[in-house]
Image (spheres, rainbow, N blue to C red):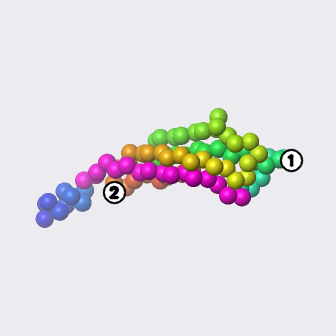
Amino acid sequence: MDVIKKQLLSFTNCTVRLYMIGGYDLANRDVGSESDPYLKIICGDKVIDEREFYQEDEPNPRFDKMYMFSVPFPGAPRLQI
């Protein structure tokens, strides 16, 4: 029984891969023009902010990027995009 408890209470480091392909028909947030979308991703205490790579006046942005996060399992943190 102790072996089962130990396995249930142990954490394993896992890799989460997030593939961001693109956006479709994003809402306008700028006055008088289309939005300037960019990615901001939060996973646990890691923050990726790509505001400097915004795409000007683009309602259908293409990102074509992959991000990797190391998280504990079970109990991985929430992923926010």
Q: CA distance from mark 2 to mark 1?
A: 46 Å
Q: Is residue 3 left or right of residue 75?
A: left
Q: Position of residue 10 (x, y in %)?
A: 25, 53
Q: Is residue 77 left or right of residue 36?
A: left
| Comes first in the chain, label 2 or label 1 | 1
Along the viewing direction, whichever of 4 and 66 lies nearer the viewer? 66
Q: Are marks 2 and 1 in contact (CB under 8 Å)?
A: no
At label 2, the amino acid type is Pro
Q: Is residue 4 above or below residue 45?
A: below
Above/below status of 45 relative to 22: above
Residue that mark 1 sits on: 32
| Mark 1: few/some/many CA within 10 Å (<14, 14-19, 20+) | few
Prevalent SS, magenta region: strand
> Farthest bottom residue?
1
Is 55 or 48 nearer to us in this picture?
Answer: 55
Of discs 2 and 1, which sits in the foreground?
1
Which residue is pictured at 42% across the width and 45% down the height?
69
**Which residue, given by chain and number where applicable, does mark 2 sit on?**
74
- Please indicate whether residue 44 sits to the left or right of residue 20 in the image: left
Q: Amino acid at mark 1?
A: Gly
Residue 24, percent from left and from top: 67, 58
Give the magenta range: 10-25
- The numbered dot on residue 81 is none
